[in-house]
Image (cartoon, rainbow, N blue to C red):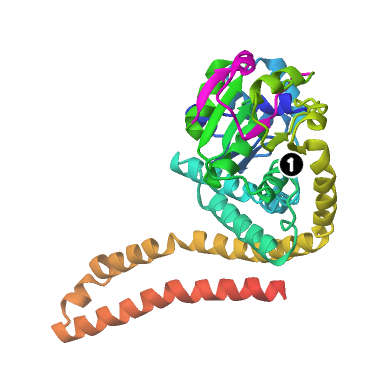
């Protein structure tokens, strides 16, 4: 499915709670969680109903009431459905980043946790989703700890940042940021974490430039004003969607003026934003996407070698989860027992044996009360232990 099609399933934060509760209130399920990232949207739910085409149609109809019937029918052909333990295994893989577009990226574990917390705060999750997500995060942590799946950076941005650090750029360096897309924003996060503070943002749309400038404490300009910028710079970071160079020889000459010092350019655009002929005329440390892409590809190959070990961990934890889930089902079933036992006790003492108890002296009543309390506790704990033992025996 194209990213454009994936995007239509995204629920904005301000409508998330309302949309999820529409599904729950419609009776389609008892628990629901939504996980949305840059390239996937997942709905994790608990329902006692058969999840067939009709259920899916009702589900998306409740989530997106603005959709027409054609949109709803199309969803049935676009989605991938996992049920039962297969669904649990899928979430384990997602949280562990073995089923991600970029294998081994740790960010997904935070996204899973944050998605759960948002849906929990909206009172849309319950015991089942809590148990699944809690274990998915534990599995992911074990995968990241016991394998090398996340040891080598594979994102172009992280590699560009690592390369930039090699040049030991001064903390007071002047950065020109060209573009405001996700790649540039990710790069700016690295820069601000490194302590850089002097940013000037250029973009074709001023409002987008102002938005990013506000985030990083910089100033905003229209891209067309780059040619007349005379305040100097030390580093250019650029990534736009232009089909031709944004920083031409002429513009660079105007930017640098009489400054003959070494400059650094980080060009993450495809095609390039920075005219490569500039490097032949001026002192430029160029970090270009074509240079670091080869490193990223090799690192990704190294990460994928770890997948077999990751899947072994996930499969083992899936077996353990199945046992844990069975025990939890018993615990949930037993939750009503204490109230039932207290009910029986009350009936026995206040109705069935009320006259006999009334004839007892105070000491005998106290002993009887202690005996009943003892039996009440054992009546609850013993069956629970027996049920757990049966589960463990069946496993063996």
Q: Is residue 346 left or right of residue 74?
A: left
**In which quadrant is the N terminus drawn?**
top right
Q: In which quarter of the image is residue 141?
A: bottom right
Residue 58 in the image: state x and y as whole percent: 63, 27
Residue 392 in the image: state x and y as whole percent: 65, 74
Residue 292 in the image: state x and y as whole percent: 79, 43
Decide which of 265, 204 is in the foreground and name it.
265
Q: How crowded is mark 1: few (under 14 residues within 10 Å), some or many (20 or more)?
A: many
Residues rendered magenta in the picture: 218-243
- Number of dots carrying numbers: 1
Query: Could you tell me if residue 22 is visible in this image?
Result: no
**Residue at horizontal 45 percent and vertical 74 percent from the top:** 381
Task: Give the structural element (helix, strand or loop) at label 1.
Answer: helix
Residue tagged 1: 156
Decide which of 277, 214 is in the foreground and name it.
277
Q: In this view, does 245 lie to the left or right of 221?
A: right
The question of residue 162 being in magenta is answered with no
Decide which of 272, 251 is in the foreground and name it.
251
Query: Could you tell me if residue 152 is visible in this image?
Result: yes
Decide which of 148, 380 is in the foreground and name it.
148
The question of residue 223 being in magenta is answered with yes
Decide: is 349 above or below 57: below
**Residue at horizontal 80 percent and vertical 57 percent from the top:** 307
């Amino acid at each position: 499915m194209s990213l454009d099609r994936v995007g239509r399933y995204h629920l904005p934060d301000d409508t998330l709670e309302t949309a999820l509760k529409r599904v729950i209130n419609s009776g389609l399920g008892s628990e629901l969680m939504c996980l949305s990232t840059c390239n996937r949207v997942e709905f994790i739910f608990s329902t006692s109903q058969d999840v067939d085409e009709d259920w899916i149609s009702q589900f998306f109809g409740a989530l997106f009431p603005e959709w027409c019937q054609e949109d709803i029918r199309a969803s049935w052909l676009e989605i991938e459905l996992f049920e039962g333990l297969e669904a649990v295994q899928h979430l384990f893989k997602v949280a562990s980043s073995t089923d991600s577009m970029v294998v081994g990226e740790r960010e997904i574990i935070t996204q899973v946790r944050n998605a759960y917390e948002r849906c929990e705060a909206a009172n849309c999750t319950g015991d089942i989703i809590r148990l699944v997500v809690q274990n998915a995060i534990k599995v992911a942590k074990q995968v990241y700890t016991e394998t090398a799946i996340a040891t080598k950076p594979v994102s172009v941005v992280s590699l560009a940042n690592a390369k930039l650090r090699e040049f030991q750029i001064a903390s007071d360096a002047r950065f020109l940021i060209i573009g405001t897309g996700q790649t540039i924003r990710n790069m700016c996060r690295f820069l601000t974490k490194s302590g850089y503070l002097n940013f000037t943002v250029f973009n074709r749309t001023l409002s987008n430039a102002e938005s990013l400038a506000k985030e990083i404490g910089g100033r905003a300009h229209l891209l067309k004003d780059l040619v007349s910028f005379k305040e100097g710079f030390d580093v250019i970071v650029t990534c736009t969607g232009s089909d031709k160079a944004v920083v031409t020889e002429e513009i660079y000459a105007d930017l640098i003026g009489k400054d003959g010092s070494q400059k650094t350019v980080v060009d993450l655009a495809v095609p390039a934003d920075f005219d490569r002929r500039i490097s032949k005329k001026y002192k430029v440390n160029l970090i270009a996407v074509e240079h670091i892409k080869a490193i990223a590809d090799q690192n990704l190959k190294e990460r994928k070698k770890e997948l077999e070990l990751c899947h072994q961990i996930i499969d083992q934890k899936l077996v353990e989860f199945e046992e844990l889930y069975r025990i939890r089902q018993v615990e949930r079933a037993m939750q009503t027992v204490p109230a039932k036992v207290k009910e029986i006790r009350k009936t026995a003492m206040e109705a069935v044996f009320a006259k006999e108890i009334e004839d007892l002296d105070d000491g005998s009543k106290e002993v009887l009360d202690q005996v009943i309390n003892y039996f009440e506790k054992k009546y609850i704990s013993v069956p629970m232990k027996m049920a757990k033992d049966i589960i463990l025996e069946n496993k063996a």
